[in-house]
Image (cartoon, rainbow, N blue to C red):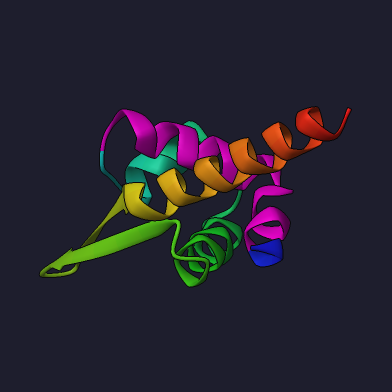
Amino acid sequence: MSDIFTTLASSVRRDILSMLKERDMTAGEISDKLTVTKPTLSGHLNILKSADLVVTERQGTTITYSLNTTVVDELLANLVGLLSSKDEKE
């Protein structure tokens, strides 16, 4: 889980996840909305994919990125659990 927090430490990666929350997108569509170079974007997408926060689907030469809602739901459940545990101790 600490890997996911490290992954989420980047505002660019959080912006990508926010965009993917709205709809699936290609790297080109994501790139059009961000002010990062294509190699930098590729690195961010690889980190998100390694953390299982995004999944990809290839159609020919086009890769479409989607939010992995299963992992995001699990992350949110863990966060809620952490916060409620803290509240119960106080």
Give yes or no for residue 30 being in the magenta stretch. Answer: no
Specify start and end residues of the magenta stretch as a single range. 4-23
Hey, which residue is sitting farthest right in the picture?
90
Q: Quadrant of residue 57?
A: bottom left
Q: Say which of 64 and 29 sits in front.
A: 64
Question: What secondary structure prevails in the magenta region?
Answer: helix
Q: Is 49 drawn above or below residue 80 in the view shown?
A: below
Q: Say which of 22 and 3 sits in front.
A: 3
Q: Is residue 10 left or right of residue 80?
A: right
Q: Is residue 32 left or right of residue 85?
A: left
Which residue is rendered at x = 50% and y = 63% of the image? 42
Q: Say which of 28 and 11 sits in front.
A: 11
Which residue is rendered at x = 54% and y = 56% of the image? 41
Q: Is 75 drawn above or below residue 21 in the view shown?
A: below
Residue 33 pos. (x, y %): 47, 32
Res 35 visible: no
Q: Quadrant of residue 58?
A: bottom left
Which residue is rendered at x = 44% and y = 65% of the image? 52
Hey, which residue is sitting farthest left in the picture?
60
Residue 23 pos. (x, y %): 27, 34
Res 51 visible: yes
Residue 15 pos. (x, y %): 55, 36
The C terminus: image quadrant? top right
The N terminus: image quadrant? bottom right
Total numbered labels: 0
Q: Is residue 26 left or right of residue 18?
A: left
Which residue is rendered at x = 65% and y = 49% of the image? 8
Residue 43 pos. (x, y %): 57, 66
